[in-house]
């Protein structure tokens, strides 16, 4: 264990750990990179294309080319890496792809994997997304590499998918009924990840991450009405209509099925629990919807 020494040297030693960030150009990954840079962490972002590398280089972030489907690229990427932030697009292939990284990380002596999972991850879940994440969690546990699992709720940033209907129809359409959701600002997920990546004491922990308050879509429409200065309505649609809309938009059937099942759970009021893990880890409360909207409202104007 590299952390067995006097506390006076602790922060120096931890900050010198080399951190690999996967999923670095996505919503959470980009915030993780920015926040790691703010604390002067030694990070390198794994990317699959020169175009994505260029965007990160412009922010002063070092990159390395790698692909979760290519074991030989992972063997190069993970050389000399102490800690991995593990995030990729969730799909039926993700247990294999993330499993590749876990296997190589163990071989290369990586000390700690901080994985973005999902609320409700379970090998027994009827929802594919929850099973896929649980399969990788099991792989990591079985590998013997120290881990921290972050299981976030639905992101506030996903409200950007409602931007067009808010702009053009002054409405949010969703199959949520009156159900409340412990929606979270993705910047808070990143803040917890950065603590787990740069501090000792988070190994073996699973953090369930929610916002500070459960919100219904009525609450969302009221907040948008206030911030935009015009009436934004929430219009409930049937889950069947929402499912068909996802398919019409080109979403894969497995994902449309999973999201429909999740939306039914939320509509039934089973997504309203609030966790204090953000406060426990970061020392501050989770961000509020009004704070998210204050920063992002231009997307909806």
Image (spheres, helix red, strand yellow):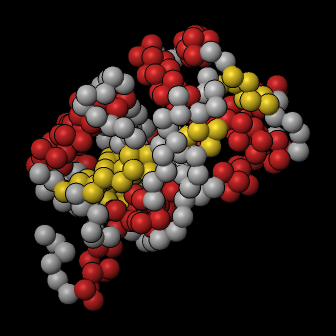
> Quadrant of the rendered structure where residue 282 is?
bottom left
Please give left or right for residue 97 compared with residue 274 in the image. left
Residue at 24% across / 42% down in the picture?
A: 137
Q: Is any atom of residue 274 visible in this view?
A: yes
Write down the quadrant of residue 233 in the picture.
top right
Residue 259 can be seen in this image? no
- The spot of residue 220 in percent (x, y) is 70, 40
Q: Is residue 199 left or right of residue 273?
A: left
Counting from the top left corner in percent of width and height, residue 177 is at 63, 27
Quarter holding the C terminus is: top right
Could you tell me which residue is drawn at 45 percent across and 13 percent down?
A: 253
Residue 208 x %, y %: 39, 50
- Specify whether 30 is left or right of 223: left
Q: Nearer the viewer, residue 206 or 90?
A: 206
> Which residue is at 52% across, 68% downward?
284
- Percent position (x, y) of residue 121? 32, 37
Which residue extends farthest right? Answer: 230
Depth order, front residue of 253/70: 253
Which of 243/213 is in front? 213
Q: Residue at the location (71% across, 36% down)?
A: 218
Q: Nearer the viewer, residue 63 or 207?
A: 207
Q: How many marks?
A: 0
Quadrant (top left, top right, bottom left, bottom right) of the N terminus = bottom left
């Amino acid at each position: 264990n590299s952390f067995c020494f006097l506390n006076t040297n602790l922060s120096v030693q931890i900050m010198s750990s080399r951190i690999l960030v996967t999923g670095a150009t996505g919503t959470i990954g980009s915030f993780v990179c920015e926040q790691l840079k703010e604390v002067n962490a030694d990070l390198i972002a794994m990317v699959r294309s020169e175009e994505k590398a260029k965007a990160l280089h412009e922010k002063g972030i070092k990159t390395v080319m790698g692909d979760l489907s290519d074991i030989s690229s992972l063997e190069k990427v993970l050389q000399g890496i102490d800690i991995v932030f593990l995030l990729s697009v969730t799909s039926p292939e993700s247990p294999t792809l993330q499993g590749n990284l876990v296997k190589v990380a163990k071989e290369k002596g990586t000390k700690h994997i901080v994985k973005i999972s999902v609320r409700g991850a379970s090998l027994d879940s009827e929802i594919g997304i929850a099973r896929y994440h649980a399969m990788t969690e099991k792989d990591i546990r079985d590998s013997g590499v120290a881990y921290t699992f972050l299981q976030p709720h639905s992101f506030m940033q996903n409200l950007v998918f409602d931007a067009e209907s808010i702009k053009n129809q002054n409405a949010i359409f969703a199959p949520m009924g009156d159900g409340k959701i412990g929606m979270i600002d993705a910047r808070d997920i990143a803040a917890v990840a950065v603590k787990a990546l740069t501090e000792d004491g988070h190994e073996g922990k699973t953090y369930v991450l929610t916002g500070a308050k459960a919100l219904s879509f009525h609450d969302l429409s009221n907040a948008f009405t206030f911030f935009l200065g015009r009436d934004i309505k929430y219009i409930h649609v049937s889950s069947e209509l929402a499912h068909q809309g996802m398919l019409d938009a080109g979403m894969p059937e497995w994902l449309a099925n999973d999201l429909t099942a999740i939306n039914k759970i939320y509509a039934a009021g089973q997504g309203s629990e609030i966790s204090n893990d953000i406060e426990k880890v970061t020392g501050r409360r989770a961000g509020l919807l009004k704070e998210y909207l204050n920063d992002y409202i231009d997307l909806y104007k």
